[in-house]
């Protein structure tokens, strides 16, 4: 295969703009036997070069200061060439020409004690007509190393190479734009999830930070020979995106469940009003001699004690054992309205709320809350992820699975879960424990959180190695 075709294939395959520029510059200089070459890359059509490459066979370009000055002057000359349009430019002897761009190159010659003669210039224009780069070649050399004009045949070859590089650069820009679009959309979704309720704080972004910190630790272990897993750029990126989107389904979860701060929540004031009413009915019964003073006072003492029990039970994290029977008795009690209608002291839902064994959610509410992972999966399955991101929905929707199969929604076990899902599970629990902004619980310290995580690991729920790696990260909690 000819060198030219080989170079063309390499150019087309390039996925990195800087490496593409370097390849084009080196290849162009080799094909033209030219002495000096400059390549610039621009971003967003601003024509402010973010990458400059200067190579020369004869000039000493190793002195850093001299390089910077030379590049700045070449850059200025290239801007003048670009002002002329998007066609290639060739000159046999620039000392015969007087336009400002040639004057600048001549001035540059005297600055670096050099003599530029022949010149080729190619702008790199993207398919959307944006100018994204420029190639400047100076002094084609003959066999004796003397500057000669660039031959027409060589000009055409370099023109073809530059055109191909423009197409490759267009593809790189396109892929970059797509990725940017995807990332900004994920960012917006993450903001929507985290800002839906102030109680969610920065949860998605925080657990992403924890996941990536664990992932970096895994890579460290791999490099020291202590681990067998390694997260390359793409694997890390899929984990990052999975972590950012893991609670996407919470956009659909009802806020009154997600934000439920106490067991009774808004029901407490309803019970309070009902108790005031019951108290009034008791008093009327006493005044109308349907009960004795002693019976009336006994009922009032029971109401006061029951109200105290309700207030206490409403706020505890774990239901106190000694409260269960009094609450059951209260739930079975009824009062009689003046109309003769009989009503319960507590509705079945209020009684269920007060007798929640742990936390603030009833069985049904917890079920709805847990559905957020199913919704995450459902929503992410509707998104077209490219091959590079195809595992994001799986990583995102398995963060509540436990190694022993006791998690949800699919009760998967350790051997069915990816390392990414296991990392997400540990990070998610750690943030849930330490977050300072949850309505239903007080935050706990980093030390206590790791004690709980360790306990869960000891019981086969989460991966002990990942717990220890998260602990090694020393990331701030909360
Ligand atoms: Fe979740
Ligand atoms: Fe979460």
Image (cartoon, rainbow, N blue to C red):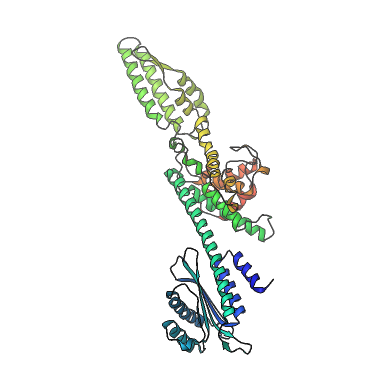
The image shows residue 129, relative to residue 241, as above or below, that is below
Report x, y in % for residue 304. 39, 24
Q: Where does the N terminus fall, quadrant-wise?
A: bottom right
Residue at screen point 53% across, 28% down:
321
Looking at this rendering, what residue extends furthest in the front direction? 152
Question: What residue is rendered at 47% in x and 63% in y?
Answer: 128
User: Which residue is located at x 66 percent, y 58 percent?
Assistant: 222
Q: Is residue 420 left or right of residue 249?
A: right
Toward the viewer: 286 or 278? 278
Residue drawn at (47%, 54%) of the image = 184
Q: Position of residue 417 (x, y in %)?
A: 64, 44
Work out whether residue 412 or residue 23 is closer to the camera in this orientation and state it: 23
Residue 371: give x, y in percent of width and height: 53, 36
Q: Residue furthest top?
A: 289
* Residue 471 showing in the rendered view: no
Question: Residue 35, relative to residue 371: is it above or below?
Answer: below
């Amino acid at each position: 295969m000819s060198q030219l075709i080989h170079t063309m294939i390499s150019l087309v395959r390039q996925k990195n703009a800087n490496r593409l520029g370097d390849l084009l510059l080196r290849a162009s200089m080799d094909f033209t036997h030219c002495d000096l070459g400059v390549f610039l890359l621009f971003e967003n059509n601003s024509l402010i070069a973010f990458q400059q490459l200067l190579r020369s066979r004869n000039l000493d370009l190793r002195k850093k200061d001299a390089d910077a000055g030379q590049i700045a002057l070449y850059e200025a000359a290239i801007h003048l060439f670009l002002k002329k349009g998007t066609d290639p430019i060739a000159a046999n002897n620039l000392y015969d020409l007087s336009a400002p761009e040639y004057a600048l190159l001549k001035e540059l010659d005297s600055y670096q004690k050099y003599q530029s003669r022949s010149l080729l210039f190619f702008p790199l224009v993207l398919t959307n007509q944006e100018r994204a780069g420029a190639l400047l070649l100076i002094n084609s050399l003959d066999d004796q190393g003397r500057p000669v004009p660039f031959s027409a045949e060589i000009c055409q070859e370099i023109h073809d190479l530059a055109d191909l590089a423009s197409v490759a650069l267009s593809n790189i820009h396109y892929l970059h734009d797509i990725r940017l679009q995807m990332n900004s959309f994920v960012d917006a979704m993450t903001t929507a999830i985290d800002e839906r309720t102030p109680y969610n704080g920065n949860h998605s972004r925080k657990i992403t930070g924890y996941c990536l910190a664990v992932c970096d630790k895994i890579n460290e272990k791999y490099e020291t020979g202590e681990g067998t897993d390694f997260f390359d750029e793409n694997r890390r990126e899929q984990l990052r995106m999975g972590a950012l989107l893991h609670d996407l389904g919470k956009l659909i979860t009802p806020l009154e469940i997600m934000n439920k701060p106490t067991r009774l929540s808004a029901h407490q004031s309803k019970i309070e009003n009902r108790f005031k009413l019951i108290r009034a009915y008791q008093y009327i019964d006493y005044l109308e001699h349907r009960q004795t003073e002693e019976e009336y006072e006994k009922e009032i003492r029971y109401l006061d004690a029951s109200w105290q029990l309700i207030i206490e039970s409403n706020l505890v994290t774990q239901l106190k054992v000694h409260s269960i029977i009094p609450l059951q008795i209260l739930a079975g009690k009824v009062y009689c309205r003046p109309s003769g209608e009989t009503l319960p002291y507590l509705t079945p839902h209020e009684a269920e709320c007060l007798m929640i064994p742990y936390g603030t959610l009833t069985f049904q509410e917890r079920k709805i809350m847990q559905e957020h992972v199913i919704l995450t999966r459902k929503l992410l399955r509707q998104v077209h992820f490219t091959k590079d991101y195809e595992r994001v929905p799986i990583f995102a929707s398995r963060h509540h699975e436990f190694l022993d199969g006791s998690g949800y929604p699919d009760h998967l076990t350790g051997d069915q879960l990816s390392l990414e899902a296991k990392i997400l599970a540990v990070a998610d629990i750690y943030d849930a424990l330490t977050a300072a902004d949850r309505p239903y619980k007080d935050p706990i310290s980093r030390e206590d959180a790791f004690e709980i995580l360790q306990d869960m690991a000891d019981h086969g729920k989460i991966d002990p190695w990942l717990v220890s790696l998260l602990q090694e990260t020393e990331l701030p909690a909360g």
